[in-house]
């Protein structure tokens, strides 16, 4: 679940059937980044990036804001192939089983963005 408002606030929650929202056993975040600014029209900005563990196992995720020209986002997983994000309302989110992105916050994660005109670009996102 991803909730967001136009002022930069967002709340993200990923859970399995063993835990409720915003309780132990879930992965997520809530708040407004201190350096919040809207992304450029063709930019992606990560607000959540990495891996966590729930009772069902590990999960990798990338979520954040997407510029107005971004219509699709994909990640090439070494384990799962191409993983497509949900892109809506200036935000994107993708997740998949495993801890493949455990070091992504500092080492970077390569995503492919597709724009309204059909062109694509590669973005490397970090949290640092």
Image: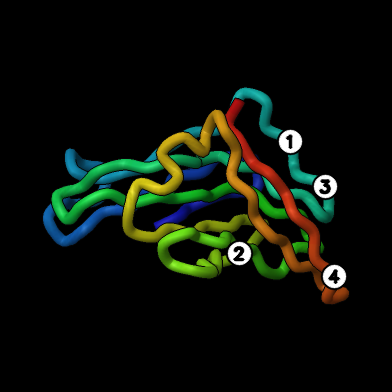
Lateral position of residue 118 relative to residue 124, left or right: right
Looking at the image, do the residues carrying marks 1 and 2 touch, with CB atoms under 8 Å apart? no
| Quarter that holds the N terminus | bottom left
The residue labelled by disc 2 is 74
Q: Is residue 26 above or below residue 103?
A: below
Calculate the distance from the C-alpha at mark 1 to the C-alpha at mark 4: 24 Å
Q: Evaluate if marks 1 and 4 touch, with contact meaning CB atoms under 8 Å apart.
A: no
Q: Residue 123 at what x, y percent from top left?
A: 72, 49
Disc 3 marks which residue?
40
Q: Residue at x 58, y 47 (%)?
A: 64
Q: CA distance from mark 4 to mark 2?
A: 14 Å
Give coordinates of residue 127: x percent, y percent.
58, 31
* Mark 1 to mark 2 CA distance (whole Å): 23 Å
In this rendering, the label closer to the viewer, 2 or 3: 2
Relative placement, left or right, of 104 versus 71 is: left
Q: Residue at x 39, y 60 (%)?
A: 96
What separation in Å lies between label 2 and label 3 (alpha carbons)? 18 Å
Viewer-nearest of discs 3 and 4: 4
Which numbered disc covers residue 37? 1
Mark 4 lies on a secondary structure that is loop
């Amino acid at each position: 679940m991803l909730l967001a408002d136009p002022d930069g606030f967002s709340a993200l929650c990923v859970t399995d059937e063993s835990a409720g929202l915003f309780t132990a056993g879930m992965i997520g975040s809530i708040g407004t980044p201190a350096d919040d600014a809207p992304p450029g029209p063709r930019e992606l900005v990560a607000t959540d990036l990495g891996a966590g563990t729930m009772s069902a196992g590990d999960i990798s995720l990338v979520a954040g804001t997407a510029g107005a020209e971004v219509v699709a986002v994909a990640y090439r997983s070494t384990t799962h192939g191409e993983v497509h994000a949900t892109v809506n309302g200036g935000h994107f989110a993708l997740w998949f089983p495993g801890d493949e992105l455990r070091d992504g916050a500092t080492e970077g994660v390569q995503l492919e963005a597709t724009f309204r005109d059909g062109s694509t670009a590669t973005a490397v996102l970090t949290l640092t």
